[in-house]
Amino acid sequence: MPRVGVIGGGQLARMMVPEALELGIDLHVLAESDDSPASISATAVGDYRDEAMVLAFARTVDVVTFDHEHVPQGVLRALEAEGIAVRPGPDALLYAQDKILMRRRLQELGLPVPDWATVANADELAAFLADHGGVGVVKTSRGGYDGKGVRVVRSAGEVDDWFAAAADGDGPELLVEELVNFRRELAQLVARRPSGDIAAWPVVETVQKDGVCAEVIAPARGASGRIAEVAERIAVAVAEGLGVTGVLAVELFETDDDRILINELAMRPHNSGHWTQNGSVTSQFEQHVRAVLDLPLGATAPVAEWSVMVNVLGGPTDGSALVDHYPAMLAQHPAAKMHAYGKTPRPGRKLGHVNVVGDDLDEVVYAARAAAAFFTTL
Amino acid sequence: MPRVGVIGGGQLARMMVPEALELGIDLHVLAESDDSPASISATAVGDYRDEAMVLAFARTVDVVTFDHEHVPQGVLRALEAEGIAVRPGPDALLYAQDKILMRRRLQELGLPVPDWATVANADELAAFLADHGGVGVVKTSRGGYDGKGVRVVRSAGEVDDWFAAAADGDGPELLVEELVNFRRELAQLVARRPSGDIAAWPVVETVQKDGVCAEVIAPARGASGRIAEVAERIAVAVAEGLGVTGVLAVELFETDDDRILINELAMRPHNSGHWTQNGSVTSQFEQHVRAVLDLPLGATAPVAEWSVMVNVLGGPTDGSALVDHYPAMLAQHPAAKMHAYGKTPRPGRKLGHVNVVGDDLDEVVYAARAAAAFFTTL
């Protein structure tokens, strides 16, 4: 039986467990702690930056994949040097780890990105702002996540702390991007096998709150024609151009002036694809397992007209657990599908999500939001 | 977090694991062996007939349920005596364990069963055969499973071995049933909470080969009207009349003369409900976990017009594993959903099943059969 090793024991690894189990494929997880979301499949607990630890884990599996993109290049290269299959590989992950390298590569590939520049000091930033209406989005090249490492600035002095850290070698390099005037945000999910086949799900609409994904509507409203085609073409070009294997999520802006621009990439199952667990013939987690094993990819058709995913963020603040709210929530929303990550509530933390699938968008949106709202005590 | 304990580590326990994990509910399994299908969640390994072993396991969970109906009444009563929630309870399971008690109770409830009688010797059997066209189906009251403990007889001497064993106290009592001339076999699945709510899936059509379920078509063809209503009414009456909690499967005959008769019962998730994993808003495994925890039941609507399940029986005889056939199968059937039980191939053994869901029955049946056929080397 082929054995897949996942580095990182977060909710993405957790949600691969059911899919691997149903396929009869062994999944082993290198988790950060004993009580990680994926602990049911954790065969090792340790630091993903520890080369010896990761190597020892990787030698017990047939292919290594990831819950996150943070494994250092040195560790990834050491795995490859031992002949271990790493999917996605270090050459691809480099672009997910460094936003400057990523934007350079996307431009080389002729793919649409917002205007951007690297900036090393306030003068360079001031020049960029002057050219872009006095506003820009400064991002750290590395370490950004769920809105962290991102600041919208209207004056060049607002990121002096980051410039100082970068100059001292204590912080990552910085880039600045134009503040895109967008109508909405989209995400295009695809999966690619090492042998080259690609499967795409329908493009979806994502709603962010405070830099964190709050809600996904699949497919994106009114996106059956040109937008869907363009989004898919972009994601396929990214997957092929960057040599991604497994699931790739491409976050996109649909601009006020009708352009589709690439915002960010994720080379793993992604929050924008959680709807596929109940809304698609093949979920992103099953597809990721199949892709990294170089098995044929599954059908990506939706099972209904609409799927809506709403995140459960933060959770109850009264000390109750998610499950304490199940009797009320499940009674009112019998078609809502709960996905809990086994985490303790904490402000802003992703604790789970609710999927609802159906043919009437208004009803589906209402049920998903109302069901998720049971888990937030205001 | 509530904790569900499952006695028995077979494929039914295995398929509860993903559903409990997504709901964020702890599932513990008392398995028969270290390599049981549900080993990922096994917290104890031992004999389900060993009262001390089962009690020790049950004390670690909030509610006990089952992968099979074989736990002895003495053990079940000992759990209840300790105040442990047992679902379904011993009073209900008694009827699943003893076909004579079950038929008596169903008749008391006024529910339709084939003509039957207990028989203690060849003379009694001969009398029954003479009244029923010279043919009958003899069944052992206990221990029957997947066609075992069942013989179609045309002469009273054909079960002398069973009569001798019963007379010596070495074998179970016997009953004989009329051989029902049926058009087809149906199965009606429902789930019932301790607090009384019941949810029913659409009635399905089952195809048996050599006494073992081979294929399920959901819903049963042409069963939108009277047949569906009658089947549901019967299963609800059985669930309430026998006090079943959790999932109940009622196997039915649709006779040549347009009657619906009860064939057998199962008080647990059942092969006839595996289609719900991909074909229903709520799978039988999720519903069982919800029901035994007395949580509100989920919607049972189909997600498409048709779902077909085909069992993978026996498996390859050339020493290959199921997974060796995935590249060919998955490439040809991208919409087929594989469910493997983690068992070694052996003639007649249930190793897994394939579900296919869609709106064109001919296509769905073809794909499910063709996909499952990849795993049988003739």
Image: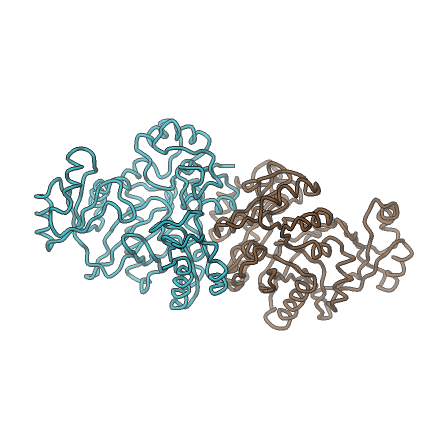
Chain colours: A cyan, B brown
Q: Relative to residue A128, is residue B142 drawn left or right?
A: right
Seen in the image, is B370 located left or right of residue B347? left
Q: Which residue appears at 55% of the width and 50% of the height? A: B16
Residue A85 figure quarter: top left
Q: Is residue A135 left or right of residue A370?
A: left
Of residues A223 and A99, which is closer to you in this image? Answer: A99
Q: Position of residue A225 (x, y in %)?
A: 31, 62
Relative side of A134 to A3, left or right: left
Q: Could you tell me which quadrant the C terminus of chain A lies in?
A: bottom left
Coordinates of residue B268 in the picture (x, y in percent): 63, 54
Is there any visible trace of residue B316 in the rendered image? yes
Name of the residue lying farthest toward the right: B123
Picture quadrant where residue A167 is located: top left
* The quarter of the displayed image where residue B92 is located: bottom right
Report the front residue among B199 and B51.
B51
Residue A204 vs B378, above or below: the answer is below
Identified at 75% across, 59% down, the residue is B102
Total labels: the figure holds 0
> What residue occupies the far bottom of the structure in this picture?
B226
| Above or below: residue A204 compared with residue A265 | below
Q: Position of residue A96 (x, y in %)?
A: 28, 42
Res B191 seen here: no
Find residue B14 and report its horizontal and vertical position in percent: 57, 46
Residue at position x 66%, y 70% in the image: B230
**Closer-to-camera residue (B234/A42):** A42
